[in-house]
Amino acid sequence: MTPGFRYFFCIFVFVFHWTLGAATETGSTGAIEQSASVPLVFDEAAAIAAAERDFPGYLDAAWKSKTDYGFRTDDDQADVSLASPIPVFALRRDAITPDRAPASIVDILEPAGEWIFPVQAQGAYRTLFGVRLTDKGWKAVYLGNPYIAKALQELRAAWNANGADDFRLISSFHPRAFLFSVPGSAQLNLTPLTAVVDNGQQYFLPPSDLRALVPYEKTIATLFRYWEDSGEISGDQ
């Protein structure tokens, strides 16, 4: 496998494994609870155990072509470690309407059954390591995507108080993008973390300062415009 293809493949796998699930939450800024019907969806301890088990093998396999995975030439493998993980949420498409905002952002979110572990070296996020809940438990599914790793480090710098993330990380499969929301903010918000450009049209552009939250209504209007332009929905929906 050539370095270029390997890099493309790791990003493709990262995007492909954004999946859906279900869970409950204590409140806009409360700790995540496990639902009795889906007790494993937010099992952080099990996700961490899977990451610690599988990460050394992934890192060994990638290290010969480490720059393809986002590492620098002067990074030392012995210095590489996993940062604290981030749970991934997905938008509940059936709960989103263009003309009515939810009471809280958590009303339109569901867990994606995945935790993202930023991979750090020399104090910087280099790439990402993802674990996913499968029918056989938590398993590693990818190592890659330095672009998102850098964005997540900036996001944590903006919205992490006392070592706890104040945001919800949200994946969108169509369009393929990451967004985030800060439930504790006074204003309902949904902010792009990654840019989306399709057929020459720019739909999402992250703010230069991630503390500048985008109003929920603006992002939802952009999502519906994307779905209309792509033919996924008709203009009268």
Image (cartoon, rainbow, N blue to C red):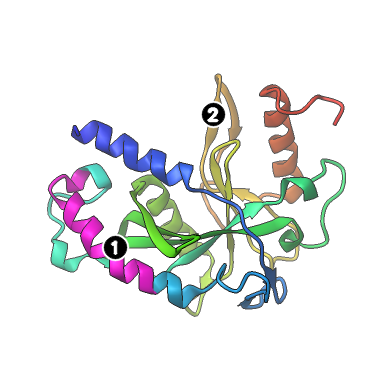
Left or right: 188, with 61 as reference point: right
Tell whether position 66 is magenta.
yes
The kind of residue on which mark 1 rests is Gln
**In which quadrant is the C terminus drawn?**
top right
Q: Position of residue 76 (x, y in %)?
A: 13, 61
Per the image, the residue denoted by label 1 is 120
SS state under label 1: strand
Image-quadrant location for residue 1: top left
Cβ atoms under marks 1 and 2 closer than 8 Å: no
The disc at residue 197 is: 2
Say which residue appears at 62% left-offset and 58% top-offset: 21
Query: For the stretch drawn in magenta, what is the main secondary structure?
Result: helix
The kind of residue on which mark 2 rests is Val
Q: Residues within 10 Å of mark 2 (few under 14, many from 20)?
A: few
Farthest residue, direction front: 136
Left or right: 84, with 182 as reference point: left
Q: Position of residue 102 (x, y in %)?
A: 82, 56
Please, is residue 215 above or below residue 2 in the view? below
Please, is residue 196 above or below residue 214 in the view? above
Say which residue appears at 62% left-offset and 78% top-offset: 31
Query: Is residue 152 visible in this depiction of the protein?
Result: yes
Q: Which residues are magenta?
A: 49-67
Query: Is residue 213 visible in this depiction of the protein?
Result: no
SS state under label 2: strand
